[in-house]
Image: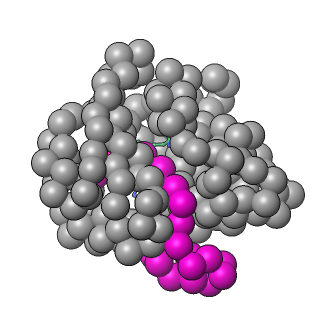
C-alpha cells in the first residue's frame, strides 16, 4: 500500500475519528475476505459504502463484469477526491457522499435493486439512528437473494445484523490493523 494513501487516511482519522473509524486502510487479507465470496459473474449492480481511500474500490473495479454499475459512497471530501482521481474515466462507477441516500442514488442511476452491497462503515461509532437508516436502506435496496458484506472491529453488531437479515455468517480476519470480523448477510 502506498505511504501517501496511509498518511491521508491517518490525517482524515485525526480530523474526524468517529466518522472514519479506523487508523489505517484495510489490509490485502481483509480485502480478499470481503470480496472473495462475491458471485462476480452475476453481480451487475453493486454498492460500496464507506470507500475511504478506495482499497476495496480498486479491487471491485478489477473483478466486476464490464457492464457492472458500481455506486461508491464516501462522505469525506478529501477521500472522495482520491477515488475520483484514481477512476476518472470509469463509466460504470458513480461517486456519492452519504450512504444514507443509497435508495435515492440507486433510483437516480436507473437501478431497480442491487446484487451486492459491501460496507466498511464504522456502525458502532456512527450515530445509532444513522446506522439503523443505512441498514434499512440496504435491506430495501438488495435483491431478494442479494448479498451484504460488512466488516467491524468488534462483535457488537452481530446480534443487530442477525435480527435484520434472514441468514448471516461470521468470519474473523487476523491480519489487519486492527483484526476484523467479516459478516456475510443475505436478505
Ligand atoms: C473504516 S473507514 C474504511 C475505508 C476503506 N473502505 C477501508 O476499508 O480501508 C470508513 C469510511 O466510511 C466513511 N463514512 C462514514 N460515514 C459515512 C456515510 N454516512 N456515508 C458514506 N461514507 C461514510 C468514512 O469517511 C471512512 O472513510
Q: Position of residue 61 (x, y in %)?
A: 72, 46
The answer to whether 105 appears left or right of 102 in the picture is right
* Residue 117 sits inside the magenta stretch: yes
Residue visible at 67% across and 24% down in the picture: 2
Picture coordinates of residue 7, whole percent (x, y): 56, 30
Specify the segment rendered in magenta. 99-124
Q: Nearer the viewer, residue 48 or 7?
A: 48
Question: Which residue corresponds to the image point at 27% horizontal and 45% vertical from the top-left?
Answer: 168
Q: Front-most of 9 and 112? A: 112
Question: Is residue 175 in view?
Answer: yes
Q: Position of residue 186 (x, y in %)?
A: 36, 54
Which image quadrant: the N terminus?
A: top right
Image point (62%, 77%), residue name: 111
Report the side of 26 relative to 95 (left or right).
left
Location of the C terminus by quadrant is bottom left
- Up-down relation of residue 152 to residue 29 (above or below): below
Question: Does the magenta-highlighted stretch encompass residue 145?
Answer: no
Amino acid at each position: 500500500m502506498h505511504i501517501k494513501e496511509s498518511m491521508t487516511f491517518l490525517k482524515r482519522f485525526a480530523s474526524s475519528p468517529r466518522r472514519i473509524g479506523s487508523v489505517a486502510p484495510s489490509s490485502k487479507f481483509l480485502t480478499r475476505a470481503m470480496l472473495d465470496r462475491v458471485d462476480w459473474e452475476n453481480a451487475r449492480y453493486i454498492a460500496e459504502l464507506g470507500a475511504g481511500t478506495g482499497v476495496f474500490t480498486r479491487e471491485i473495479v478489477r473483478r466486476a463484469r464490464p457492464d457492472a454499475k458500481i455506486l461508491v459512497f464516501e462522505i469525506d471530501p478529501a477521500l472522495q477526491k482520491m477515488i475520483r482521481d484514481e477512476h476518472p474515466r470509469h463509466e460504470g462507477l458513480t461517486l456519492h457522499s452519504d450512504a444514507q441516500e443509497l435508495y435515492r442514488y440507486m433510483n437516480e442511476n436507473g437501478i431497480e435493486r442491487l446484487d451486492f452491497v459491501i460496507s466498511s462503515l464504522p456502525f458502532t461509532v456512527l450515530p445509532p439512528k444513522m446506522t439503523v437508516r443505512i441498514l434499512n436502506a440496504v435491506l430495501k435496496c438488495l435483491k431478494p437473494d442479494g448479498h451484504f458484506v460488512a466488516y467491524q472491529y468488534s462483535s457488537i453488531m452481530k446480534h443487530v445484523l442477525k435480527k435484520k437479515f434472514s441468514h448471516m455468517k461470521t468470519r474473523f480476519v487476523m491480519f489487519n490493523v486492527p483484526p476484523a470480523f467479516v459478516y456475510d448477510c443475505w436478505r
